[in-house]
Amino acid sequence: MEKYNHKKIEEKWQEKWDKDKSYQTSEDKKKPKYYILDMFPYPSGVGLHVGHPKGYIATDIFSRMKMMQGYNVLHPMGWDAFGLPAENYALENKTHPRETTNKNVATFKAQLEKLGFTYDWEREINTTDPEYYKWTQWIFLQMFKKGLAYESYEPINWCPSCKTGLANEDLEGGRCERCGTEIERKPMRQWVLRITDYADRLLNDLEKLPDWEESIKEMQKNWIGRSEGASVKFSVILEQANQNERSDRISRSYRSDSSELRDDNYNLEVFTTRPDTLFGCTYMVVAPEHELIKNHESSIKNYKEVEKYIKQAGNKSDLERTDLAKNKTGVKIEGLTAINPVNNQEIPIFVADYVLAGYGTGAIMAVPAHDERDWEFAKKYKLPIICVIYPEKIENFSNYFIEDEKTGKSQLRGSTVVSYDPKNETIKEGIKRFLEEVKEGKHCHIGNGKLINSGFLNGLGIKEAITKMNEWLEKKKVGKKAINYRLQDWVFSRQRYWGEPIPIIHCEKCGAVGVPEKDLPVKLPEVKNYEPTGTGESPLANISEWVNTTCPKCGGPAKRETNTMPQWAGSSWYYLRYIDPKNKKALVDKQKEKYWSPVDFYVGGAEHATRHLIYARFWHKFLFDIGAVSHEEPFKRLQHVGLINAEDGRKMSKRWGNVINPDDIVEDFGADSMRVYEMFMGPFSQPCAWSTNGLIGARKFLDKVWESQSKISKENDEQKELNNLLHKTIKKVGEDIEEFKFNTAISAMMILVNKINEQKNISLETSESLIKILCPFAPHLSEELWENLGHKESIFKESWPEYDKDLIKDEMIELVLQINGKVRDKIEVSADITEEKAKKIAQESEVIKKWIEDKEIIKAIFVKGKLVNIVIK
Ligand code: ANZ
Ligand code: ZN
């Protein structure tokens, strides 16, 4: 027998698959469908390194198995080619981004093709293709029509190096995610998408996604950041007001029947999660960007000082500003005073940068006794501290901050009881001393407790006090229950060249007018100078032939919008286009969408847990609302890929000189070896380091498979033991692929192959079954072996092998399902079933379902290898 020649074999089969169009998507409606999707790459200039294809190999294995299981499989690939990285690369290399993008796409594609993937290249998409971005623009127009896309002039994140505005999502620790430059705040005109309208649905619908990893759902929850609390309006008075005006305003503020109170110039609205602490509010703080300052310039006595402070704050990033460890700074605004509505106390207003403009209302009621930031600030500026929550039990002097004598910094003392001395004081005395000590600034009590020093709230717990205060605020018309999100509307314009033009025309008479749908796409004009201008205008603004146009509404002279869309636009809906990539009339045909949607399985990098995956869910929900798609959620199952690092443990990067090009590995060891190796490295979602030794091991395994074919003989003395092992392996490999546990599937096949090689002879059937379970992993080698056995058709036309239940009996057990200790059902399961899975299966039993319907499950007990007992009320 000839030796295993990967080069010859891989070239031969790739050519054949290509010629036969083996992986063209079948749309035979009689068959079930499976849509498996990779996050498409942005084709950077450096090409792929061996880490990139890990996810693609996994989805390819999965696709091949699903094909053999009788599904129509949709497994497409495309290019996310607009955006900053592509443009920055083009600028560095002084070539037009269109040119570099085309070149990079070609390189990526060639690299991928060498790995033997099942991608249906007839469905390839590229976000920079006008036929594609026509529909990106179309979606924007629909949002514009529904009022979800709007113009705003708020200060936004500005990267001075990339010279563009950025969304919050584009920052990493206050720096530009692309270039690492610290972000400034810059007021400018921009387009914004009202994603906050969808905040609740984006949050609540996470529950409809049981097949998403919990950790990713958690990240989305935190990103959306829903906080329940109240908004409270504080009346603001000017110090110049004479005594009469003053008391009039105070009393009117209290009665809340003043028309002035509705004039926002004389109100300061805050968002608080703790309305129960209102009696403890002793001052207020506005963010440096807050409009109160500009609106009262003439009344602010120390305006110069305030202005100087604001300038300094503007240079700091949000991260720096909110850093707990940083010294709090601020300036008292002289000339303005606020009135605490709950007790009519006049309290000072500060400007301080620990309050952020972009969260809540950009102003806070400060409660120094119970908020650490306020506490530090109050101590620094000698502001009164009033304790309104005391620990119910003196033993619970917990979670408070105490000053470190040496450094003067506050420290969380966790739950240690530092302050109470039961030998020398009664509980009552202890509480009294506690209150004194809080007042003196010794502790900041952020823990639980009861209300004190709080009028009508005294004696209540925090929860009841919140409810009662909210009622009071509402009755007095000075506030109400409110919900606040960390999620902000999506800043959607970029002052850069390489993006989708925003399809809007500005007319002096008609304002911002949407480009008529028949005129889409608005093509990105060819230009010589595409460098960012840095003026806040996109380079498109310099092309007067393109900018000047006529208004679609009135026909008068008008100008095109010159901002472009962010990198994330094209990727927010691309998975829909693969379903119907060449449709000229619609984004996607309704019938096709119904058949293929949703994406059954989505695999990609964890770095997209928030941005891309929130944006895509938002667009999808919008498309659902306008009837363009039939499901509310785009991705049914989600799996993240663990990174492959370099052999030295560092990230693979040009900077470290540790990048390995897959082309070299394919050349020396073969694509099949690389595929097997990358799947064998460890648990799929975990990071791991590349190892050439490991790769050699994978190659040796394939050599052994190759050699095992010479053992096929009619006169085999195949042992029953081998047959049992074969069927166990068939079962395990199928189940492991389904669960993305490729490493254990491969190790099971290795054991099988070793066993085979111990035999003198093996049967044809054994060899064929082995090739069938191996073929998703090593498709080229398997096709060749299959052909060697005399088959004319591709192995991927075969059905996935079934295992013989009788032969794996010892692997199966009867799991007893109990309700409150009584046997109610029995099911056959794998002997090594995990606790989590057993409990899930138990609750899915039709019999058990009837028992637990409308009942509260107290707990479920699992006894390995025996039973699940569900305890209900
Ligand atoms: C009074 C108070 C008393 C507060 C107390 C907390 C504890 P989350 O949970 O993140 O929603 N806050 C509101 N807007 C802010 C802003 N723009 N910049 C900085 N801080 C801001 O946080 C809500 C709490 O953060 C609010 O509740 C407010 O302080 C502060 F014992 O109000 B709190
Ligand atoms: Zn007009």
Image (cartoon, rainbow, N blue to C red):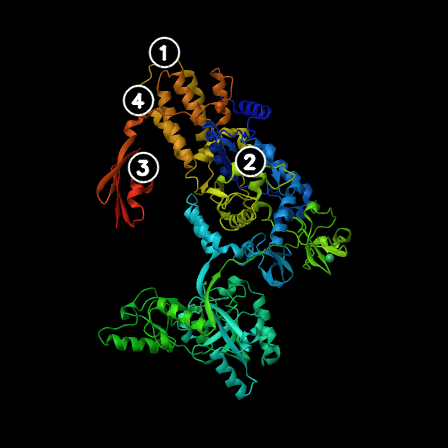
**Residue 206 has which mark?**
none
First along the sequence among labels 4 and 1: 1
Instruction: Find the distance from the CA under tag 1 to the CA under tag 2.
Output: 46 Å
Q: Residues within 10 Å of mark 1 (few under 14, many from 20)?
A: few
Name the one closer to the observer, 44 or 150: 150
First along the sequence among labels 2 and 3: 2
Q: Secondary structure at mark 1?
A: loop
Q: Are marks 3 and 4 in contact (CB under 8 Å)?
A: no
Name the one closer to the observer, 378 or 513: 513
**Residue 169, image quadrant:** bottom right
Which mark lies nearer to you, 3 or 1? 3
The residue tagged 1 is 715
The x and y percentages for residue 407 are: 41, 70
Q: Secondary structure at mark 3?
A: loop
The x and y percentages for residue 70 are: 47, 28
- In this picture, residue 173 sits left or right of residue 165: left
Instruction: Find the distance from the CA under tag 3 to the CA under tag 4.
Output: 23 Å
Type of the residue with mark 1: Glu
Which mark lies nearer to you, 3 or 4? 3
Q: Secondary structure at mark 4?
A: helix
**Residue at horizontal 57%, vertical 39%?**
590
Which mark lies nearer to you, 4 or 2? 2
Instruction: Find the distance from the CA under tag 2 to the CA under tag 3.
Output: 34 Å
Instruction: Find the distance from the CA under tag 3 to the CA under tag 1.
Output: 38 Å
Q: Residues within 10 Å of mark 2 (few under 14, many from 20)?
A: many
Q: Is residue 482 at all visible to an observer of this figure?
A: yes
**Residue at horizontal 48%, vertical 23%?**
782
Q: Work out whether 438 lies above or below 586.
A: below
**Residue 721 has which mark?**
4
First along the sequence among labels 3 and 1: 1
